[in-house]
Image: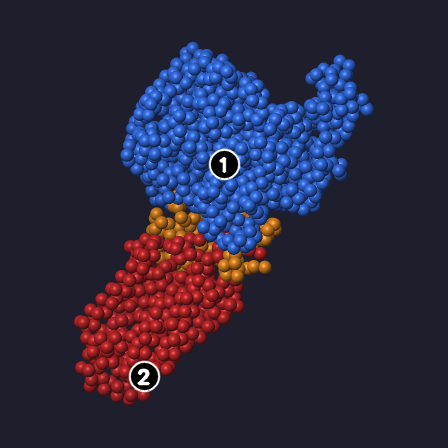
Amino acid sequence: MVIDLRKCVGCHSCAVACKSENNVPLGVHRSWVKQIEKGTYPNVAMPMLPRLCNHCTNPPCVKACPTKASYQRDDGVIMIDTKYCIGCKACIAACPYDARFINPKTMLADKCSFCDHRVDEGLEPACISTCIGRARIFGDIDDPESEVSRIKNTNNVVVLKHEARTLPNVFYINPDSDVMMHVTEGEEQGGRTE
Amino acid sequence: MNISRRTFLKSSAVLGGAAVGLPALISASKESTPDMALENKGLSDPVEGKDNVEIKYSVCLMCHSACGIRAKIKDGVLIKIDGNPYHPNCMEPHIPFDTDPAEAIKYVGSVCVKGQAGIKEIYDPLRIKHPLKRAGPRGSGKWQVITWEQAVEEIVEGGDLFGEGHVDGFRDIRDLDTPINPDAPELGSKANQLCVMVGRAEHGRKEFTDRFFKSAFGTVNYRNDHTSICETSHHVGLDLCLDGKHHIKPDIINSEYILWFGTSPVEANFPMQTLARKLMEFKARGGKMVVIDPRFSNTAAKADQWVPIKPGTDAAFALGMMRYIIENGRYDTEYLENTTKDAAANDKHKTWGDATYLVRLDDMTMLRADDAGIADGTHDQFVVINGGNPVAFDSVEHGDLETDTTVNGIACKSVFTLLKERVNEKTIEEYAQICGMESEVIEQVAYEFTEHGRKVCADFYRGPVQHTNGTYNARSIAILNFLVGNVSWKGGCEAHGGSHWHETGGKSGNPYNLAKELHPGKVNATGVPIERHKVKYEDSTEFGKNGYPARRPWFPFAYNFNHQEVIPSIGMEYPYPIKALVLIKANPNYSTPAGRIYEEVLKDTKKVPLLITFDTNYGETSALTDYILPDRKYLERYATPHVAPAVLTTVSGIRTPVVDPVYPDTMIVEDFLIQVGKRMDLPGYGDNGFGKGDPLNTAADWYNKCFVNIASEGDGVAGFTEEERLQYVLARGGRFEDYEKAYSGKYTTHGYKKQVFIYSEKLAKQKDSMTGKPYDGLPLYQPLMDCMGNEVKDAGYDFHLNTYKQVYHCQSRTAHNEWLMEILPENPIEISAADGKRLGIRNGDMMKVTSPTNAEGVIGRAQLREGLRPGVINISHHYGHWEYGSKPHKENGADTGSASYIGKGVSGNPVMRLDPYLNDVTLQDPIGGSSSFYDTKVKLVKV
Amino acid sequence: MTITSLYNIDHGMAYGLIIVAFPFFTGLSAGSFVVSTLSYVFGQERYKPIARTSVVLAIILLFMALLTLFADMTQPANFYWAIFRINPYSMFSLAGILIGLYLLMSLIYGYFIFNDNAPKARIMGILSIPVALAVHADTGFVFGLNYGTPIWHTALMPVLFVVSAIVSGLALLIVLTVIKDRLFSVVADKETVYSLGKLLAAFILVDLFLIFTDLVTMAYSGQEEYDAMILLTKGQFVVPFVGIEIFLGALIPVLILVLAKKNLIGHFIAGVLVVIGVFAMRYNVVIAGQTISKTGTGLVEFTGLTPTSFGYSHTAEILVVIGIFALGVILFLASAKYLNLDVVPMQANEKTVTSTESGQGGK
């Protein structure tokens, strides 16, 4: 998946579409949009960052799972075989992106599945088809002819925590460095001021 | 995942099952409309498969953008909403209209965050599930569940309904022959004492309720809808610039440079998702946009430039721009010199202006050819100077732009000269000072605005107009477009859009003219509306007696009603007392600036003897009424919504129920009114409602004809019979013109093709009902004023209260939606970081906001923002409900339940300033009738 | 320039107080076990009087640790998959195996001790020590191998865990010995306690050095590590970290142990403080570690808990920990009543001497 942040308007449609499509309970999110405000009046920016599971090629969650309930599909999608999940939260702790959570209804580990049930039927994930700014492009990143590959290969794309060597498969075009990483807020702790 | 989905279905089903209490006693729409149901023509959902899954098209109503939706229903439960790919709001380009629905299933359109959350609306457990009658004093929160039959009977017949004495019912009130006040016959008949307030009237329903209240019941107070608390001065201002059109939008896709004054089209405006999509495409192509707004909105975040203007000074900014444009000769002389349509056509323009027309300086009206002494000149002809001589405007192609002359002894100047003099009244520095910025900003924006030919647009929405100077702001901004001659050009300013087909008929191909032939016995409602819109004070008996000022203002230009004046006027019984107030999907107490004070009037059973509301939840206003009649939610009913001119192709969406009513003892407003109409024998209802043998017994009878009209207009859609055409549009969720029809050559196909007005003679000829002074026909900057024309300063109140709409909420009506409230559970009071630092305010501090007319104030949590003009504080709308399910009511003695998340946050409306002269209504724009949302000065105190 | 978070989702902390208790218990267990082997394996005969107590403690504490794991799972009924579907890359998976193995081995070891079978106990002890340490080192890895959590992600984590395990084990034994001495009239071998005290002081100093190197490295690392260092030394964890873990739980006990070399009560106080300090260390690792938001701006509040078998609330967590602790105390008292923990030095005096001799002879 490529997310062109120049086109993200911060509307949260993806987040609610995901809730609806995947019946995600209140309080937890498979998909959301991080938004910060930075700068000093009147030179201000409000970078957005749609967030979801990165479906890493080198997934720490899969490594951490004591029962191999978390696994990588042949097409690279990271899935959870919930019948083996013991709810130990090792995968949640292992994910450097906070993409995983315990679903309070099922009490199982949960996260974005790239809408596997839709993708398997030839549809796009729910967040893609409802993105009102058309910021999201989904497809087979291994196919060099696909639109997603073409856009990924011809733009300055960045992944979250590149240094974590997780090899994410969610690529961002034109992200802001301060929204990409953890930063200390405001003046609470000295912050990243001036 | 499958497990969780089934769980959801089960819980929803339980919810539905729990709702079955009293049976629906009057036939609900559903039973009587087998022909209207969209047949599931074997459409299979790729994900859910065929079993028990239905796909139905309808139209969203989570805001008023009217995006098409495709609903997925499994085992009778709505499980997902997607965008309708046929609908131009949802896709770019939208799929061709003749695409087979089985093929269309492969395409998915978008809907926004609110649209996605629509499911939560119908399954909301806090909905009102049965008709209710108050069982205590108004506002006691005690209700008695009644039958629909009892509701019809009591509302029609009246009587001692509450043990508090006799109350007139509809039958008593409908006296079309007796004047309310024999001394002032212009006020109309006693039937006008039935007053209706619609929150937001939707097409289809609007025409229906108008038919009922105006053309059958016969009251002039038939709608009084919300527009004046929305952006009516935007419409009125544009209406005074354009001939009969009142909504502009840039042709975003082909534009190069767009100015957004006081609007955030990627969050609000409409259709929001369409504007956002087109704007992001526009940006990707290198388009430049500037957002002029004290708040750093999401749109400002995507813009190339943010101009944090001082609230309410938009006209000064526009006048400064005009001064720069005129001084530097950066206007389109060729366009402005054209005098007529033919002249414009020769220059390849679709529109022409009035810049060369002469205005007489004695009374500021247009000089007419007969008064100018032009041979054979008539009073219908304007005069221009051509070759040094005054001539009739239509005898030449061009006139002189700058003229200061005397014609036939009358001192005259051209409109352009007057405009030039107006903009030169202040220097750009002075304008910039008013706007609170450097003059370079105005100059630079004016320069860039005139660097892109006609591929520019200066647009605005609510921000500049919900001020006391709203109409002038609107006109000032709109005229920027006329100076560059961009109207109806591809990439320019679009003043018409694709528009819609006509649901009530009257156009070629429409089989049913619902407002004329098909309304036998129609009556003509006459008289002065309670809030005096579209009527002149000078025509009243009162004016003859008292002269200026009137007791309350009159609004001759506010053609869209004046929502905020209705209840205060009822309270003052001015110009006459009323007997019944009917609210439909309206919540003025919460939604109107300072609306909370309406409570006093509404609780007064002498001022409002009968108070009825159609609502889905316990709204702040509904909670104070006599009867709450539970309406159905949009996914359970019908409509024919139109879209805004951002869409350049013709669109008529068709809303049909996608699920059976979740709470069966609710009723569509239309069905209820039909029952009332039948009981009262009103003209146009019952077995012969549409004429002999043509019944209007259910809402479906009405919408069936509306939909057929849409399907048949012009060439009609494919299909030999009405039924085939109907099914054709139902299977696609409406009728949609194909994408490539948007443009014809260098122009938009459906663009505005008439005159544009820099000068408004109508304004110049009309005096204000309070001050007795004429309005100004030119663009103008005015400071904040009360209804007596006195400047309101409020010294000591250092902060300017601003409000805005969150992208994930809609007006007052989404606070119960869990998915939307989850995003931001509590809205903050946004304070500029600089002000916060100065005053020692930290994030999360509890702050009280008080105003000169509300010392009690409202309390919320501070959030410091860099993206906010210092001196301005921001409180978004939608939050801070004091009813709406945030506290329980009692129905037949039993608790209705409540949800704690609903009342969270803070609403700015209660602290908004009252007019210091009237003291019972917010400040208002005397021309457009807009209520002032952005003019209140407040104090900020730590709690 | 200021950065304000307008919107983000933090899914809260994966681990709460129950998982604070887990390494606390495994640490105490491993520490007790190592102490019990001092006499049987390393021939430090003066530690023999406490060998039985410490092995029983090690087993009970391990059982408690296992209980915390189960209590924290949301699907404890599925636990068998952890046995049938071992994932060698998963430290959690290994933890299960190691704990199981360690439990088994320490039971056998304990059996030999109670049967006074010193040679077999010695062999079993030698075999078990690495497992006991591995359990705790693996617990360190369970945290240390998570890239996204700055306080956890350090090569020192397993070492820190092992050292602090020994520290806490020593401290616990001092405490228990003194308690038995004072409350149950089991006369303690004061010299044993004092030598345990010396050992404890030494390990505390090692622990402090490790913490110091860790903090310094954090201060010179990336933003998140730096923020974590600030969080511990100046931010909201300054009391549990600097106050309790460093001063109360390490520096003051070292001071007491050095100044009051021959004071039983002083040793008792020092021991109690060290146990509290080690608990604070577990708290600081687990909770402060998760306080630095992985992707957000600012800090995660210790409120949005991920559920456990017992739901979401802090109250439930605290009750579970207290419950497990109470169960541990009951088990210990029961074992003290039925297993004659202190009889060894008195009843088997001869054998003790013999084995001492042989032990000395071994030298």
Which color was chain C given?
red
Q: Looking at the image, what colour scheme do you see?
A: by chain
The residue identified by callout 2 is C262
Residue placed furthest toward the right = B387
Q: Residue C252 at what x, y percent from top left?
A: 38, 75
Chain letter of the blue region? B
**At x 49% / y 44%, what residue is drawn?**
B850
The residue identified by callout 1 is B593
Chain letter of the orange region? A
**Residue B281 visible in the picture:** no
Q: Residue B574 at what x, y percent from top left?
A: 49, 24
Tag 2, which chain?
Answer: C
**At x 47% / y 69%, what residue is drawn?**
C215
Displayed quadrant of residue B775: top right
Q: In which quarter of the image is the C terminus of chain C?
A: bottom left
**At x 32% / y 67%, what residue is drawn?**
C25
Displayed quadrant of residue B145: top left
Residue placed furthest toward the front = B546
SS class, disc 1:
loop
Instruction: Say which of B574 and B285 sits in front.
Output: B574
Instruction: Say which of B416 and B700 sits in front.
Output: B416
- Number of residues whose C-alpha sits closer than 10 Å to that of mark 2, classed few (under 14), some (14–19) or many (20 or more): some
Position of residue B155 relative to residue B469, above or below, is above
Position of residue B482 relative to residue C194, above or below, is above
Task: Tell me: C135 left or right of B741.
Answer: left
Instruction: Say which of B44 and A85 sits in front.
Output: A85
SS class, disc 2:
loop
Displayed quadrant of residue B823: top left
Label 1 amino acid?
Answer: Pro
Residue placed furthest toward the top = B692
